[in-house]
Structures are given as C-alpha cells and as structure tokens.
Amino acid sequence: MTADALIAEPEVVQPTAEWPQEAIAQCVATVVRSRRATRAFKAQPLGRDIVEEILADASCAPSGANIQPWRVYVVSGAVKSELTDVLVAASRAGTAPAPEHFPEPLPDTYRARLMDFGARYYASLGIARDDTHGRTRQTERNYAFFGAPVGLIFSIDRRLKAHSWIDLGLFAQSVMIAAKARGIDTCPQVAFAQFHAPIASHLHMSPNEVTAFGMSMGYGDPEAEVNQTRMPREPVQDFARLLGFPG
Ligand SMILES: Cc1cc2nc3c(=O)[nH]c(=O)nc-3n(C[C@H](O)[C@H](O)[C@H](O)COP(=O)(O)O)c2cc1C
C-alpha cells in the first residue's frame, strides 16, 4: 500500500480468522515493548519510500481539534552530513545557551531515575563518571544521528501552547512505532533543541517554527553494547490508580 493510499483510505483493523484479536494485540505489544532508544546503527541505507510510509502511518496520530501541528525535516546523505558538521561546530563553539530540559532542583524521584539512566548509559559505553571529555564526545554523537542513515528534525509553530506539544509527542511516538514495526530503529533526541538557530538556518525553517527535538532512524546494530542497555520501568501499580473496578 502506498503512503497516499494510507492517508486517503486508512484501513480499520478488523480481526479475521487468520489474524485474530489476540495476534493483533501480541503483535502491537511486541512492537511497542521492543522499541528502544538506539544509538549505534548499521551502514545499511534507508529508502525514501519506507520513510514516507512511516510518516504516513504516523500522521494518523491524534491531535487536539485535529490541528496536526507537527512538521518534520528528513535528512540523509550530504544534507545530513552538512547539518552534522554545522551542529558539531556549534557545540564546540559553546555559544548556544545551556539547555533547560528539566527544572532545577529536579524533584528527587526524577533525579534518581535520571542518575540511574546516566549510570547505565555511560557504563554501556565504558565512559567513566568523571570523564567529561568522553561525555562531551558522546553528546556530540547526537549531532551525527549516532551514525544512522536518516535523521529527522521535528519542529512546531512557536505560537502554539503546551497542549499542541502533546500532539507532537504523540506523533513522534507514532513515528517510532511505525518504524519499529518495519524492523527500523530510532532514537528521539532533545539534544537538537539547543541548536535551533543553526538548524533553522540550515533547513530554511519559517520564522514561526521552533526545533523541538530530532530523531535518528535506521537499522540498529544489535552487537553494539550501547544498544543492549535496558532502561527499567516503574510497574503499573506504582504509577496508575485504577478506580471503580469490581473486585
Ligand atoms: C523527548 C525525548 C528526548 C530525548 N533526548 C535524547 C537525547 O537527546 N539523546 C539521547 O541519546 N537520548 C534521548 N532520549 C532517549 C531517552 O534517553 C530514552 O528514551 C530513555 O532513556 C528510555 O530508554 P528507551 O527509549 O530505550 O526505553 C530522549 C527521549 C525522549 C522521549
């Protein structure tokens, strides 16, 4: 099915004898649960058609009042390499304002998880806690899209409010799931947001756009240690309250 057909005539999933409900559920759960932030990729290229199919699937994501506020720039080949060069240079120049992804102080629960993430992540790369040079070099790998053949830059109209950023997040997760369903790996990357100015200039964004995050996309290298790290999740009973059910 082409990307256009998906948009024009989205198929509703109907269980059949060959594809019963349980099989659909298992398939979706497997895709959702096997998606991982992937930070080492094979050299295998990713074709334009498959990227368009993924984006067409993701465009079925919900958005408040269906305003569909997402915009995405997909870069590969020389365009991606040039963007990487620009961003690595900007990162080394150290002139961009420091990112404020989290509030300071970060509440203890979140800080503990952030520290746990850092410990697992850098251990998988063999980078010591006090190795600031190694950490800086690894942060720079973000701008090379971790070696992925395709990079995406997600932007949104800066006049919109937080409500519409929710839509953008839902769209991004849909991109990652549609990719994983095709055996393609991704890494969402807020690291790009710090460099909106050079990105906007390089991609000729409109003045109303702001870079929200980027994403690496390609076939993950399963041998790479960094891809074998698993980030734990809080159990359902700890983050959800289920009310009003019998029993
Ligand atoms: C909005 C967002 C921004 C992220 N930014 C980065 C980033 O800049 N660089 C990076 O390596 N990973 C980034 N990640 C990946 C997270 O570290 C990763 O999703 C998290 O540790 C959970 O691991 P998992 O995705 O493998 O389950 C980001 C994830 C999200 C959702």
Image (tube, rainbow, N blue to C red):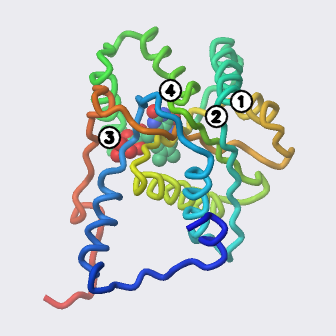
Q: Ligand 1 appears in which quadrant?
A: top left
Q: Give the residue pinned by disc 1.
A: 79
Q: Residue at x 65, y 29 (%)?
A: 77
Q: Residue at x 58, y 70 (%)?
A: 60
Q: Is residue 107 visible?
A: no
Q: Residue at x 43, y 80 (%)?
A: 13
Q: Label 4, secondary structure: give it.
A: helix
Q: Amino acid at mark 2?
A: Ser
Q: Residues within 10 Å of mark 1 (few under 14, many from 20)?
A: few
Quadrant in which the C terminus appears:
bottom left
- Ligand 1 is within 8 Å of the C-beta of the residue at disc 3: no
Disc with the residue nearer the chain's start (1 vs 3): 1
Q: Quadrant of residue 9?
A: bottom right
Disc with the residue nearer the chain's start (3 vs 2): 2
Q: Quadrant of residue 96?
A: top right
Q: Give the residue pinned by disc 2.
A: 76
Q: Label 1, secondary structure: give it.
A: helix
Distance from disc 1 to disc 3, alpha carbons, whole Å, reads 36 Å
Disc with the residue nearer the chain's start (3 vs 4): 3
Q: Give the residue pinned by disc 4.
A: 147
Front in this rendered view, residue 28 or 109: 28
Q: Position of residue 202 (x, y in %)?
A: 79, 31
Left/right placement of residue 160 relative to residue 1 reads: right
Kindly identify which numbered label has been placed on residue 113: 3
* Picture layout, residue 93 above or below residue 229: above
Are discs 1 and 2 less than 8 Å apart at CB?
Answer: yes
The residue positioned farthest toward the left in the image shown: 247
